[in-house]
Image (spheres, rainbow, N blue to C red):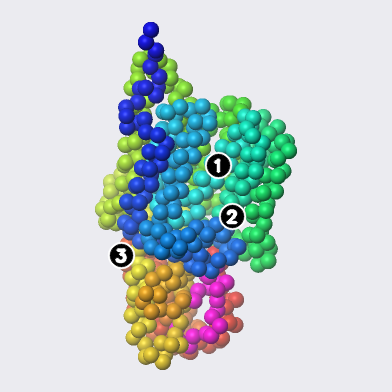
Amino acid sequence: MKPAPTLSDSLPPFARRTALALAAATLALHAAAATGYGYFRDELYFLDCARHPMWGYVDDAPGIAWLAKVALGLGGSLPAVRILPALAGAGTVLLTCLLARELGGRRFAQAFAGICVMASPVFLMEHGLLCVGAFEPLFWIGCLLLVLRLGRGGDPRLWLAFGAVAGLGVELKYTMGLVLLCLAVALALSPLRRAGRQSLFWAGVAVCVALLLPTLLWQVGHHWPLLTDLGNIRRLHKNVELPAPAFLFQQVMLIHPLLAPVWIAGLIRFLRRRQERILGLWYLLLLGSLMALKAKDYYLAAAYPVLFAGGAAALEEALESWATRGRRWPGALLTGLAGLLFLLDASAFTPLLPPGRLQAWQARLGIRERKAEAAFDGPLMQPFSDQFGWPELAEETARIFQALPAPERARTGIFANNYGEAGAIDQFGPALGLPTCICAHQACSFWGPPAVPPETFICLGLGRKALEGAFTSVTEAAQHRHPWGMGYENRPIYVCRGLKRPLGELWPEITHWD
Protein backbone atom coordinates (compact mmCIF):
# COMPACT_ATOMS: atom_id res chain seq x y z
CA MET A 1 0.00 0.00 0.00
CA LYS A 2 1.26 3.45 -0.88
CA PRO A 3 2.00 5.44 2.31
CA ALA A 4 -0.26 8.38 3.07
CA PRO A 5 1.28 11.72 2.10
CA THR A 6 2.69 13.81 4.89
CA LEU A 7 2.51 17.56 5.23
CA SER A 8 6.17 17.86 4.27
CA ASP A 9 5.47 16.04 1.03
CA SER A 10 2.65 18.48 0.26
CA LEU A 11 4.93 21.49 -0.02
CA PRO A 12 6.34 22.67 -3.34
CA PRO A 13 10.13 22.95 -3.71
CA PHE A 14 10.33 26.63 -2.80
CA ALA A 15 8.66 25.90 0.57
CA ARG A 16 10.99 22.99 1.36
CA ARG A 17 14.11 25.07 1.77
CA THR A 18 16.16 24.33 4.80
CA ALA A 19 16.70 26.72 7.69
CA LEU A 20 20.07 27.55 6.17
CA ALA A 21 18.41 28.66 2.92
CA LEU A 22 16.01 30.92 4.82
CA ALA A 23 18.88 32.38 6.80
CA ALA A 24 20.81 32.97 3.58
CA ALA A 25 17.80 34.79 2.09
CA THR A 26 17.64 37.01 5.18
CA LEU A 27 21.33 37.79 4.91
CA ALA A 28 21.06 38.52 1.18
CA LEU A 29 18.14 40.92 1.66
CA HIS A 30 19.89 43.03 4.28
CA ALA A 31 23.17 42.98 2.38
CA ALA A 32 21.33 44.33 -0.67
CA ALA A 33 19.68 47.08 1.39
CA ALA A 34 22.74 47.94 3.51
CA THR A 35 23.79 51.02 1.55
CA GLY A 36 20.34 52.18 0.46
CA TYR A 37 20.42 55.26 2.69
CA GLY A 38 23.12 56.16 5.24
CA TYR A 39 24.34 55.66 8.78
CA PHE A 40 21.59 55.57 11.41
CA ARG A 41 21.91 58.08 14.28
CA ASP A 42 22.50 55.38 16.90
CA GLU A 43 25.05 53.63 14.69
CA LEU A 44 27.16 56.79 14.72
CA TYR A 45 26.85 56.89 18.51
CA PHE A 46 27.83 53.24 18.90
CA LEU A 47 30.88 53.77 16.68
CA ASP A 48 31.84 56.68 18.94
CA CYS A 49 31.39 54.43 21.99
CA ALA A 50 33.65 51.86 20.33
CA ARG A 51 36.34 54.55 20.03
CA HIS A 52 36.04 55.05 23.81
CA PRO A 53 35.76 51.50 25.19
CA MET A 54 34.35 51.24 28.71
CA TRP A 55 32.57 48.57 30.75
CA GLY A 56 29.35 50.55 30.62
CA TYR A 57 27.68 53.60 29.15
CA VAL A 58 24.94 55.93 30.30
CA ASP A 59 22.17 54.35 28.25
CA ASP A 60 23.64 51.06 27.02
CA ALA A 61 25.45 47.99 28.21
CA PRO A 62 28.94 47.57 26.69
CA GLY A 63 28.03 44.77 24.28
CA ILE A 64 26.82 47.02 21.47
CA ALA A 65 30.09 48.97 21.62
CA TRP A 66 32.01 45.69 21.33
CA LEU A 67 30.08 44.92 18.15
CA ALA A 68 30.72 48.42 16.84
CA LYS A 69 34.41 47.84 17.58
CA VAL A 70 34.28 44.84 15.25
CA ALA A 71 32.72 47.07 12.59
CA LEU A 72 35.53 49.60 13.06
CA GLY A 73 38.03 46.76 12.70
CA LEU A 74 36.39 45.90 9.38
CA GLY A 75 36.91 49.50 8.25
CA GLY A 76 33.86 51.22 9.72
CA SER A 77 32.16 51.55 6.34
CA LEU A 78 28.41 51.23 6.01
CA PRO A 79 28.61 47.63 4.67
CA ALA A 80 30.99 46.73 7.53
CA VAL A 81 28.53 48.12 10.07
CA ARG A 82 25.46 46.54 8.52
CA ILE A 83 26.86 43.03 7.99
CA LEU A 84 26.71 42.40 11.74
CA PRO A 85 22.93 42.90 12.19
CA ALA A 86 22.34 41.07 8.91
CA LEU A 87 24.19 38.06 10.33
CA ALA A 88 22.15 38.42 13.53
CA GLY A 89 18.99 38.30 11.41
CA ALA A 90 20.17 35.12 9.74
CA GLY A 91 20.99 33.67 13.16
CA THR A 92 17.55 34.58 14.50
CA VAL A 93 15.89 32.70 11.65
CA LEU A 94 18.12 29.67 12.27
CA LEU A 95 17.38 29.61 16.00
CA THR A 96 13.65 30.01 15.39
CA CYS A 97 13.69 27.00 13.06
CA LEU A 98 15.71 25.06 15.63
CA LEU A 99 13.23 25.91 18.38
CA ALA A 100 10.34 24.81 16.16
CA ARG A 101 12.16 21.52 15.69
CA GLU A 102 12.68 21.22 19.47
CA LEU A 103 8.92 21.63 19.87
CA GLY A 104 8.32 18.70 17.56
CA GLY A 105 7.90 20.65 14.35
CA ARG A 106 9.05 19.10 11.11
CA ARG A 107 9.88 20.70 7.79
CA PHE A 108 6.71 22.76 7.43
CA ALA A 109 6.79 24.11 11.00
CA GLN A 110 10.46 25.04 10.78
CA ALA A 111 10.12 26.77 7.41
CA PHE A 112 6.88 28.54 8.33
CA ALA A 113 8.25 29.83 11.65
CA GLY A 114 11.37 31.12 9.91
CA ILE A 115 9.40 32.92 7.22
CA CYS A 116 7.15 34.53 9.86
CA VAL A 117 10.24 36.04 11.48
CA MET A 118 11.52 37.21 8.10
CA ALA A 119 8.18 38.88 7.28
CA SER A 120 7.80 40.78 10.57
CA PRO A 121 8.23 44.56 10.08
CA VAL A 122 10.11 45.05 13.35
CA PHE A 123 12.79 42.51 12.38
CA LEU A 124 13.03 43.78 8.81
CA MET A 125 13.95 47.19 10.23
CA GLU A 126 16.09 46.10 13.16
CA HIS A 127 18.19 43.59 11.24
CA GLY A 128 19.05 46.33 8.78
CA LEU A 129 20.67 48.49 11.50
CA LEU A 130 23.46 48.09 14.03
CA CYS A 131 21.19 48.29 17.06
CA VAL A 132 20.66 46.30 20.22
CA GLY A 133 17.32 44.97 19.00
CA ALA A 134 18.99 43.17 16.11
CA PHE A 135 20.91 40.89 18.48
CA GLU A 136 18.48 40.45 21.38
CA PRO A 137 16.53 37.52 19.86
CA LEU A 138 19.72 35.44 19.69
CA PHE A 139 20.03 35.55 23.48
CA TRP A 140 16.34 35.27 24.32
CA ILE A 141 15.77 32.28 22.04
CA GLY A 142 19.07 30.72 23.09
CA CYS A 143 18.18 30.83 26.80
CA LEU A 144 14.68 29.45 26.28
CA LEU A 145 15.88 26.69 23.97
CA LEU A 146 18.43 25.57 26.58
CA VAL A 147 15.87 25.63 29.40
CA LEU A 148 13.44 23.60 27.31
CA ARG A 149 16.10 20.98 26.61
CA LEU A 150 17.13 20.84 30.25
CA GLY A 151 13.53 20.35 31.28
CA ARG A 152 13.34 17.38 28.92
CA GLY A 153 16.31 15.63 30.49
CA GLY A 154 19.11 17.32 28.60
CA ASP A 155 22.72 17.21 29.76
CA PRO A 156 22.94 19.24 33.01
CA ARG A 157 26.12 20.84 31.69
CA LEU A 158 23.84 22.89 29.49
CA TRP A 159 23.30 25.08 32.57
CA LEU A 160 26.85 26.35 31.99
CA ALA A 161 25.93 27.27 28.42
CA PHE A 162 22.76 28.91 29.72
CA GLY A 163 24.80 31.03 32.14
CA ALA A 164 27.12 32.13 29.35
CA VAL A 165 24.26 33.08 27.01
CA ALA A 166 22.41 34.87 29.81
CA GLY A 167 25.49 36.79 30.97
CA LEU A 168 26.40 37.91 27.47
CA GLY A 169 22.77 38.88 26.92
CA VAL A 170 22.89 41.21 29.93
CA GLU A 171 26.14 42.70 28.59
CA LEU A 172 24.25 43.47 25.39
CA LYS A 173 21.21 45.06 27.03
CA TYR A 174 20.24 45.45 30.65
CA THR A 175 16.65 44.51 29.83
CA MET A 176 17.95 40.94 29.67
CA GLY A 177 17.96 41.06 33.47
CA LEU A 178 14.17 41.45 33.44
CA VAL A 179 13.93 38.64 30.88
CA LEU A 180 15.89 36.34 33.21
CA LEU A 181 13.83 37.37 36.24
CA CYS A 182 10.59 36.53 34.44
CA LEU A 183 12.12 33.26 33.28
CA ALA A 184 13.09 32.38 36.86
CA VAL A 185 9.53 33.04 38.08
CA ALA A 186 8.09 31.02 35.18
CA LEU A 187 10.50 28.20 35.98
CA ALA A 188 9.33 28.17 39.59
CA LEU A 189 5.67 28.07 38.49
CA SER A 190 6.08 25.42 35.80
CA PRO A 191 6.69 21.66 35.93
CA LEU A 192 10.25 22.35 34.78
CA ARG A 193 11.17 23.73 38.21
CA ARG A 194 12.85 20.43 39.01
CA ALA A 195 15.44 21.21 36.35
CA GLY A 196 16.52 24.19 38.46
CA ARG A 197 17.51 21.82 41.25
CA GLN A 198 20.27 20.17 39.24
CA SER A 199 23.70 20.52 40.78
CA LEU A 200 25.09 22.46 37.84
CA PHE A 201 22.30 25.05 37.98
CA TRP A 202 24.20 27.24 40.43
CA ALA A 203 27.37 26.84 38.40
CA GLY A 204 25.47 28.35 35.49
CA VAL A 205 24.31 31.20 37.72
CA ALA A 206 27.94 31.78 38.70
CA VAL A 207 28.96 31.97 35.04
CA CYS A 208 26.24 34.54 34.38
CA VAL A 209 27.24 36.67 37.39
CA ALA A 210 30.92 36.53 36.45
CA LEU A 211 30.15 37.82 32.96
CA LEU A 212 27.99 40.72 34.11
CA LEU A 213 30.13 41.67 37.12
CA PRO A 214 32.41 44.15 35.25
CA THR A 215 29.50 46.24 33.96
CA LEU A 216 27.78 46.05 37.36
CA LEU A 217 30.92 47.37 39.06
CA TRP A 218 31.19 50.12 36.42
CA GLN A 219 27.63 51.25 37.13
CA VAL A 220 28.28 51.26 40.88
CA GLY A 221 31.57 53.12 40.44
CA HIS A 222 29.89 55.81 38.33
CA HIS A 223 26.88 56.19 40.66
CA TRP A 224 24.41 54.30 38.46
CA PRO A 225 24.20 56.41 35.29
CA LEU A 226 21.61 54.00 33.92
CA LEU A 227 19.16 54.72 36.74
CA THR A 228 19.75 58.46 36.42
CA ASP A 229 19.10 58.27 32.68
CA LEU A 230 15.89 56.26 33.13
CA GLY A 231 14.69 58.71 35.77
CA ASN A 232 15.33 61.66 33.47
CA ILE A 233 13.48 59.98 30.61
CA ARG A 234 10.45 59.44 32.80
CA ARG A 235 10.60 62.93 34.31
CA LEU A 236 10.89 64.61 30.90
CA HIS A 237 8.23 62.33 29.31
CA LYS A 238 10.63 61.66 26.45
CA ASN A 239 9.07 58.32 25.51
CA VAL A 240 5.51 57.79 24.36
CA GLU A 241 3.85 56.01 27.30
CA LEU A 242 1.13 53.68 26.11
CA PRO A 243 -1.80 52.39 28.19
CA ALA A 244 -2.14 48.61 28.28
CA PRO A 245 -4.66 48.29 25.38
CA ALA A 246 -2.52 50.47 23.10
CA PHE A 247 0.62 48.54 24.09
CA LEU A 248 -1.09 45.26 23.15
CA PHE A 249 -2.32 46.75 19.88
CA GLN A 250 1.20 47.80 19.00
CA GLN A 251 2.43 44.24 19.53
CA VAL A 252 0.08 43.18 16.76
CA MET A 253 1.21 46.00 14.47
CA LEU A 254 4.94 45.54 15.11
CA ILE A 255 4.86 41.89 14.15
CA HIS A 256 2.11 42.33 11.50
CA PRO A 257 -1.63 41.82 11.96
CA LEU A 258 -1.70 38.92 9.51
CA LEU A 259 0.89 37.07 11.60
CA ALA A 260 -0.90 37.66 14.91
CA PRO A 261 -2.89 34.37 14.70
CA VAL A 262 0.39 32.45 14.46
CA TRP A 263 2.03 33.83 17.61
CA ILE A 264 -1.28 33.79 19.51
CA ALA A 265 -1.66 30.11 18.59
CA GLY A 266 1.86 29.58 19.90
CA LEU A 267 1.01 31.23 23.21
CA ILE A 268 -2.13 29.10 23.59
CA ARG A 269 -0.16 25.94 22.80
CA PHE A 270 2.48 26.79 25.40
CA LEU A 271 -0.07 27.44 28.13
CA ARG A 272 -1.93 24.21 27.42
CA ARG A 273 1.09 21.89 27.34
CA ARG A 274 2.69 20.93 30.61
CA GLN A 275 6.27 20.65 29.33
CA GLU A 276 6.05 23.91 27.37
CA ARG A 277 4.07 25.99 29.85
CA ILE A 278 7.20 27.79 31.02
CA LEU A 279 7.38 29.57 27.64
CA GLY A 280 3.82 30.87 27.89
CA LEU A 281 4.22 31.94 31.51
CA TRP A 282 7.49 33.68 30.68
CA TYR A 283 5.89 35.68 27.87
CA LEU A 284 2.92 36.77 29.99
CA LEU A 285 5.16 37.80 32.90
CA LEU A 286 7.42 39.79 30.61
CA LEU A 287 4.49 41.41 28.82
CA GLY A 288 2.95 42.48 32.13
CA SER A 289 6.26 43.77 33.47
CA LEU A 290 6.98 45.91 30.42
CA MET A 291 3.47 47.36 30.43
CA ALA A 292 3.78 48.18 34.13
CA LEU A 293 7.14 49.87 33.52
CA LYS A 294 5.72 51.94 30.60
CA ALA A 295 8.44 50.54 28.35
CA LYS A 296 8.68 51.18 24.63
CA ASP A 297 6.41 48.84 22.70
CA TYR A 298 9.23 47.24 20.70
CA TYR A 299 11.08 46.07 23.83
CA LEU A 300 9.07 42.84 23.66
CA ALA A 301 9.82 42.14 19.99
CA ALA A 302 12.50 39.52 20.65
CA ALA A 303 9.88 37.26 22.27
CA TYR A 304 7.89 36.70 19.11
CA PRO A 305 10.22 34.29 17.29
CA VAL A 306 9.63 31.97 20.27
CA LEU A 307 5.85 32.26 19.86
CA PHE A 308 6.17 31.82 16.08
CA ALA A 309 7.97 28.52 16.65
CA GLY A 310 5.15 27.31 18.89
CA GLY A 311 2.44 28.57 16.56
CA ALA A 312 4.02 26.94 13.51
CA ALA A 313 4.34 23.61 15.35
CA ALA A 314 0.68 23.84 16.41
CA LEU A 315 -0.39 24.68 12.87
CA GLU A 316 1.54 21.75 11.47
CA GLU A 317 -0.27 19.39 13.81
CA ALA A 318 -3.62 20.83 12.77
CA LEU A 319 -2.80 20.45 9.08
CA GLU A 320 -1.54 16.89 9.34
CA SER A 321 -5.08 15.51 9.22
CA TRP A 322 -5.64 17.32 5.93
CA ALA A 323 -2.46 15.88 4.44
CA THR A 324 -3.29 12.33 5.45
CA ARG A 325 -6.61 12.65 3.58
CA GLY A 326 -4.80 13.71 0.44
CA ARG A 327 -5.53 17.42 0.77
CA ARG A 328 -2.01 18.67 0.37
CA TRP A 329 -2.71 22.26 -0.60
CA PRO A 330 -3.36 24.00 2.79
CA GLY A 331 0.26 23.81 3.95
CA ALA A 332 1.58 24.89 0.57
CA LEU A 333 -0.90 27.77 0.45
CA LEU A 334 -0.01 29.07 3.91
CA THR A 335 3.70 28.88 3.24
CA GLY A 336 3.27 30.66 -0.08
CA LEU A 337 1.19 33.42 1.51
CA ALA A 338 3.79 33.90 4.24
CA GLY A 339 6.46 34.15 1.55
CA LEU A 340 4.45 36.76 -0.34
CA LEU A 341 3.98 38.73 2.88
CA PHE A 342 7.74 38.67 3.37
CA LEU A 343 8.31 40.11 -0.11
CA LEU A 344 5.69 42.80 0.42
CA ASP A 345 7.00 43.83 3.83
CA ALA A 346 10.59 43.78 2.62
CA SER A 347 9.68 46.41 0.06
CA ALA A 348 8.05 48.63 2.70
CA PHE A 349 10.33 48.23 5.73
CA THR A 350 13.82 48.15 4.24
CA PRO A 351 15.63 50.93 2.31
CA LEU A 352 15.41 49.19 -1.05
CA LEU A 353 13.39 52.05 -2.59
CA PRO A 354 14.46 55.71 -2.85
CA PRO A 355 12.95 57.73 0.02
CA GLY A 356 10.27 59.42 -2.08
CA ARG A 357 9.07 56.13 -3.54
CA LEU A 358 9.23 54.46 -0.14
CA GLN A 359 7.07 57.20 1.35
CA ALA A 360 4.51 56.85 -1.44
CA TRP A 361 4.53 53.05 -1.25
CA GLN A 362 4.00 53.03 2.52
CA ALA A 363 1.14 55.50 2.13
CA ARG A 364 -0.43 53.27 -0.50
CA LEU A 365 -0.19 50.31 1.87
CA GLY A 366 -1.70 52.34 4.72
CA ILE A 367 1.47 52.19 6.82
CA ARG A 368 1.66 55.03 9.31
CA GLU A 369 4.45 56.33 11.51
CA ARG A 370 4.64 54.80 14.97
CA LYS A 371 6.30 57.11 17.47
CA ALA A 372 8.31 55.62 20.32
CA GLU A 373 9.64 59.02 21.40
CA ALA A 374 7.62 62.22 21.54
CA ALA A 375 10.13 64.40 19.63
CA PHE A 376 10.24 62.40 16.38
CA ASP A 377 9.21 64.60 13.45
CA GLY A 378 10.78 63.16 10.31
CA PRO A 379 9.12 62.80 6.90
CA LEU A 380 9.77 59.04 6.99
CA MET A 381 9.64 56.49 9.78
CA GLN A 382 12.24 57.39 12.38
CA PRO A 383 14.61 54.48 11.55
CA PHE A 384 14.74 55.83 7.98
CA SER A 385 14.73 59.60 8.51
CA ASP A 386 17.54 59.25 11.03
CA GLN A 387 19.77 57.93 8.24
CA PHE A 388 19.81 61.21 6.33
CA GLY A 389 21.78 64.42 6.67
CA TRP A 390 24.87 63.29 8.59
CA PRO A 391 27.54 63.54 5.87
CA GLU A 392 26.09 66.87 4.81
CA LEU A 393 26.27 68.16 8.40
CA ALA A 394 29.94 67.23 8.58
CA GLU A 395 30.67 68.82 5.19
CA GLU A 396 28.90 72.07 6.15
CA THR A 397 30.85 72.15 9.41
CA ALA A 398 34.10 71.55 7.54
CA ARG A 399 33.42 74.47 5.17
CA ILE A 400 32.90 76.78 8.15
CA PHE A 401 35.99 75.41 9.89
CA GLN A 402 38.24 75.80 6.84
CA ALA A 403 37.00 79.36 6.24
CA LEU A 404 38.39 80.52 9.59
CA PRO A 405 41.84 82.14 9.67
CA ALA A 406 44.55 79.55 10.28
CA PRO A 407 45.56 80.87 13.75
CA GLU A 408 41.93 80.84 14.90
CA ARG A 409 41.28 77.46 13.31
CA ALA A 410 44.00 75.94 15.49
CA ARG A 411 42.06 77.08 18.58
CA THR A 412 38.60 76.09 17.33
CA GLY A 413 36.49 73.21 18.59
CA ILE A 414 33.20 71.72 17.42
CA PHE A 415 30.43 71.39 19.99
CA ALA A 416 27.40 69.17 19.29
CA ASN A 417 24.12 69.14 21.20
CA ASN A 418 23.46 65.42 20.82
CA TYR A 419 25.30 62.17 20.21
CA GLY A 420 24.06 61.82 16.63
CA GLU A 421 25.69 65.09 15.60
CA ALA A 422 28.84 64.23 17.55
CA GLY A 423 28.99 60.79 15.96
CA ALA A 424 28.63 62.29 12.48
CA ILE A 425 31.55 64.67 13.06
CA ASP A 426 33.72 61.88 14.46
CA GLN A 427 32.82 59.49 11.63
CA PHE A 428 33.15 61.83 8.64
CA GLY A 429 35.23 64.62 10.14
CA PRO A 430 38.75 63.11 10.05
CA ALA A 431 38.69 62.95 6.25
CA LEU A 432 37.56 66.59 6.20
CA GLY A 433 40.25 67.82 8.57
CA LEU A 434 37.91 68.34 11.53
CA PRO A 435 38.92 67.88 15.19
CA THR A 436 37.18 65.40 17.48
CA CYS A 437 33.75 66.67 18.46
CA ILE A 438 32.93 67.91 21.96
CA CYS A 439 29.57 66.77 23.32
CA ALA A 440 27.99 66.49 26.76
CA HIS A 441 25.10 64.22 25.77
CA GLN A 442 24.79 60.69 27.19
CA ALA A 443 28.09 58.75 27.27
CA CYS A 444 29.84 61.48 25.26
CA SER A 445 29.89 63.46 28.50
CA PHE A 446 32.52 61.06 29.86
CA TRP A 447 34.96 62.00 27.08
CA GLY A 448 35.18 65.74 27.81
CA PRO A 449 35.81 68.51 28.30
CA PRO A 450 39.10 68.59 26.39
CA ALA A 451 42.31 69.22 28.31
CA VAL A 452 42.94 72.40 26.31
CA PRO A 453 39.56 74.14 25.84
CA PRO A 454 38.95 75.86 22.48
CA GLU A 455 38.58 79.62 22.22
CA THR A 456 36.22 79.49 19.22
CA PHE A 457 33.34 77.04 18.93
CA ILE A 458 31.35 75.81 15.94
CA CYS A 459 28.05 74.87 17.60
CA LEU A 460 25.60 72.30 16.17
CA GLY A 461 21.99 71.68 17.16
CA LEU A 462 21.62 74.62 19.57
CA GLY A 463 19.45 77.74 19.46
CA ARG A 464 20.75 81.30 19.34
CA LYS A 465 19.17 82.29 22.64
CA ALA A 466 20.93 79.56 24.59
CA LEU A 467 24.25 80.34 22.92
CA GLU A 468 23.98 84.07 23.56
CA GLY A 469 23.70 83.29 27.25
CA ALA A 470 27.04 81.47 27.14
CA PHE A 471 29.10 83.49 24.59
CA THR A 472 29.81 87.16 23.97
CA SER A 473 29.66 86.67 20.18
CA VAL A 474 27.28 84.39 18.27
CA THR A 475 27.26 84.40 14.46
CA GLU A 476 25.10 82.25 12.20
CA ALA A 477 27.44 80.64 9.66
CA ALA A 478 25.17 78.19 7.82
CA GLN A 479 21.74 76.60 7.83
CA HIS A 480 21.75 72.81 7.91
CA ARG A 481 18.76 71.28 6.20
CA HIS A 482 18.03 67.89 4.66
CA PRO A 483 14.60 67.16 3.17
CA TRP A 484 14.51 63.55 4.42
CA GLY A 485 16.27 64.03 7.76
CA MET A 486 14.73 64.55 11.17
CA GLY A 487 13.09 67.97 11.46
CA TYR A 488 14.81 68.97 14.68
CA GLU A 489 18.22 68.57 13.02
CA ASN A 490 17.38 71.26 10.45
CA ARG A 491 18.90 74.13 12.39
CA PRO A 492 21.47 76.90 11.96
CA ILE A 493 25.16 76.31 12.63
CA TYR A 494 26.80 79.03 14.70
CA VAL A 495 30.34 80.25 15.22
CA CYS A 496 30.66 81.36 18.85
CA ARG A 497 33.45 83.29 20.57
CA GLY A 498 34.10 84.60 24.05
CA LEU A 499 32.88 81.83 26.35
CA LYS A 500 31.76 83.62 29.51
CA ARG A 501 32.73 80.80 31.90
CA PRO A 502 35.42 78.10 31.67
CA LEU A 503 34.23 75.00 29.84
CA GLY A 504 35.35 72.75 32.70
CA GLU A 505 33.20 74.74 35.11
CA LEU A 506 30.21 74.56 32.77
CA TRP A 507 30.54 70.87 31.99
CA PRO A 508 28.44 69.47 34.88
CA GLU A 509 25.67 71.95 34.03
CA ILE A 510 25.54 71.20 30.30
CA THR A 511 25.83 67.42 30.70
CA HIS A 512 22.45 65.91 29.86
CA TRP A 513 21.41 62.27 30.10
CA ASP A 514 18.05 61.65 28.49
Question: Does residue 376 appear in this view?
Answer: no
> Over which residues does the magenta segment extend?
438-457
Horizontal placement of 297 versus 387: left or right?
right
**In-front residue for pair 509/145:** 145
| Residue assigned mark 1 | 142
Q: In this image, 187 relative to 250: left or right?
A: right
Q: Earlier in the sequence, mark 1 or mark 3?
A: 1
Vertical order, 190 against 364 (above or below):
above
The amino acid marked with disc number 1 is Gly
Q: In this view, does 312 lie above or below 176?
A: above
Q: Against 274, is 174 above or below?
A: below
Near mark 3 (Cα within 10 A), the count class, few <14, some 14-19 or many ≥20, is: few
The residue drawn where x is 49% and y is 50% is 135
Q: What kind of element bears circle 2?
A: helix
Q: What element carries label 1?
A: helix
Alpha carbon distance from label 1 to label 2: 15 Å
Residue at the disc numbered 3: 483
**Residue picked out by circle 2:** 171
At label 3, the amino acid type is: Pro
Q: Is mark 3 on a helix, strand or loop?
A: loop
